[in-house]
Amino acid sequence: MKKSLLALAVLGAFAGAASAQSSVTLYGKVDLALGKATGSADKQVRDGAGSRVGIKGVEDLGGGMKALFGFEHRFDPDTGTQNSANMWNGYSTVGLGGAFGSVNLGRQYTSSFTLLQNAFDPFLGDTVAGLRGVALAQSPARVRVANSIRYDGAFAGVKIAADIAERTTGTDRPYSVAAQYAVGPFMAAVGYENPEGANDKLVQAGVAYTFGPAKLALAGSSGKNAANASVKGFLVGATVNVGPAGRVLVGYAQNKVASADADKKVSVGYRHDLSKRTYLYTDFTRVNKLTTEKTGYDFGVQHNF
């Protein structure tokens, strides 16, 4: 009996050590709203923020090294179906990390997306009001690449990242590089993307500053698309804290391709926190170039876990 208790104690000690050296986290968010998208007359229940469930983990390998993995599933909560043919459409990676930073392989976000495109839009690209798709993530920009390798590092307030992926249908291997500097209330970032085409490329840059309850952001992009036509875009936005639980979001974005008239979008929204994980939101947006249904709106709830 004593030997059995001793064996259980030893096993428990080993299990405790193993769990202390590694962790696995289940996370995600669920978002649904009543609303109408621009360009459509349909009033519907819609996902405005890319509902998802993911698993990520880290294992301590000793000597300052660690193993990393993660994969994320995207789905439509209004129907319960996945929103892409890819099961792990968000990302699916495995890699190693240490004092040098981290290196991950698989399907993942581009460096320009995480450090720049997603950093300056007050709406983070979500809901009918999202602005990054007009000004920063427009073609030829890419959000994710498959069969890729990516490096991330952080040194004295500067985050840097670089990724390159296998070529699929184009002439070049797609790659992007980006850097972001943040100190106190100030943040700045710059990025460069070279997708698969022979001509397409995009330079992006942005700055943001927080003072009092407000954060102001300004960002722009310039380059060429696959047809070798010039592409330019910019956005200006603000987030203003209102009271202990509210946030007002406003922004304007536009892009111009070659000599065509510019696409212009203006958005305003409000977020009200019910807890650290759950908030209510509403947005209104207007796009100039649509011949009908130029306006869109939503009233929704989002829960994060």
Image (cartoon, rainbow, N blue to C red):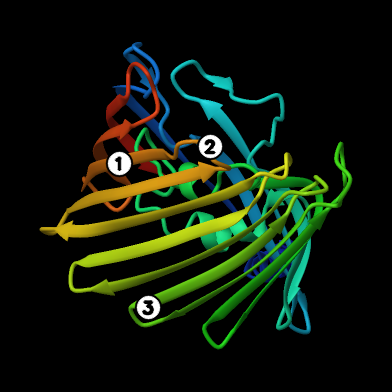
- Of the two numbered discs 1 and 3 on the same chain, state the one appearing first in sequence: 3
Q: Residue furthest left?
A: 243
Task: Tell me whether the residue at label 2 lies in contact with that at label 1, contact meaning CB atoms closer than 8 angstroms.
Answer: no
Taking depth in this image into account, of 64 and 271 the one nearest to the observer is: 271
Tell me the quadrant of the picture where the N terminus can be found: bottom right
Q: Secondary structure at mark 3?
A: strand
When the figure is inspected, residue 259 is found, relative to residue 224, above or below; the finding is above
Q: Secondary structure at mark 1?
A: strand
Disc 2 residue type (three-letter): Arg
For the point 65% across and 60% down, the residue is 111
Disc 3 residue type (three-letter): Phe
Q: Which residue is mark 2?
A: 52
| Horizontal and vertical percent position of residue 154 | 61, 79
State left or right for residue 107 relative to residue 187: right
Q: Nearer the viewer, mark 2 or mark 1?
A: 1
Mark number displayed over residue 186: 3
For the point 73% across and 41% down, the residue is 226
* Label 2: few (<14), some (14–19) or many (≥20) C-alpha neighbours in 10 Å: many
Q: Which residue is mark 1?
A: 266
Q: Secondary structure at mark 2?
A: strand
State left or right for residue 97 relative to residue 303: right
State left or right for residue 174 relative to residue 153: right
Marks 2 and 1 sit apart, C-alpha to C-alpha, by: 27 Å
Disc 1 residue type (three-letter): Val
Q: Nearer the viewer, mark 3 or mark 2?
A: 3
Taking depth in this image into account, of 176 and 104 the one nearest to the observer is: 176
